Image: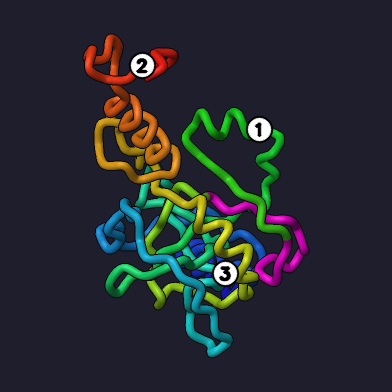
Amino acid sequence: MAGLLSRLLTVLRGPGPNPPGVAGPLTREASPAAYPGDFHGVPRMEWAADADGQPDPGEVVWTWVPFEEDHSRGKDRPVLLIGRDGRWLLGLPLTSKDHDRDGGQERRAGREWVDIGTGGWDRQGRPSEVRVNRIIRVDAARIRREGAILDRGIFESVTGRSRPSGLRRPNRKGPVTTSGDRALAVRRSVRATRPSWPWPTSCWRPGSGG
């Protein structure tokens, strides 16, 4: 009787949490409305890692990550923290899957990944990749543990390529925002100010000897 009651309680409660470093089972969020949705925009990203027991940008932590297509469902996985948005931490999801093999398929699906190597966030020592075009919000209260501090150089390389999904390059007709746009604007300016032939007869012309 006691064994039957124990099994019944296990079914009702669901499986316990996976040990850190091991991806958790698919779970349904108890209160989907509590997650306000992914972050869209360009946050302030800076490395501020500190081994003080508190989650900070520049650290990899284990927490619940909602699926992109259904925020009411998700799983435990490592996340690289990159910044803050009010009471929320902002992070980029990690995976141990090798997307170099299906990079084209992933890009067509709108997912962009960057290799970050190995670290203490994965107890099996598997190389990881971080998705740079999906920024999720992370509740500090739901973080299970700090996995590791990411090297500052790698962090800056990752955040330099990070952009929310759907954020596109500004239109050429808009403000000049990149070095390529600036170079194009200079070339256009030079063409616009270059005199056209024929010049006025009072002006000196090449070979006129004047």
- Quadrant assignment, res 19: bottom right
Say how many tags the image has.
3
Q: Tell me the amino acid under the disc marked 1.
A: Asp
Looking at the rendered image, the disc whose residue lies closer to the viewer, 1 or 2, is 2
Q: Residue at x 63, y 34 (%)?
A: 103
Report x, y in % for residue 126: 75, 58
- Seen as rendered, the residue at the extreme right is 125
Dot 3 falls on a residue whose secondary structure is: strand
User: x and y percent of residue 196 in the render?
Assistant: 29, 16
Nearer to the camera, 170 or 121 = 170
Q: Quadrant of residue 90?
A: bottom left
The segment highlighted magenta reads 118-131
Q: Is 147 left, or right, of 54 in this rendering?
A: right
Residue 128, x across and y down, in percent: 67, 55
The residues tagged by marks 1 and 2 sit, at their Cα atoms, a distance apart of: 62 Å
Q: Is residue 108 above or below residue 182?
A: above
Q: Secondary structure at mark 2?
A: loop
Three-letter amino acid code at the position of disc 2 = Arg
Name the residue carrying label 2: 205
Foreground mark, 2 or 3, reads 2
Residue 84, compared with residue 206, is above or below; it is below
82 magenta-colored: no
Q: What residue is pinned by disc 3? A: 60
Q: What's the magenta bit mostly, secondary-structure-wise? A: loop
> Given the image, on which type of amino acid does mark 3 rest?
Val
Crowding around mark 1 (Cα neighbors within 10 Å: few <14, some 14 to 19, many 20+) is few
Q: Earlier in the sequence, mark 2 or mark 3?
A: 3
Say which residue appears at 30% left-offset and 74% top-offset. 87
- Kindly identify the residue that appears in the image at 41 percent across and 17 percent down: 209
Determine which residue is flagged by label 1: 102
| Upstream in sequence: badge 3 or badge 1 | 3
Q: Are marks 3 and 1 in contact (CB under 8 Å)?
A: no
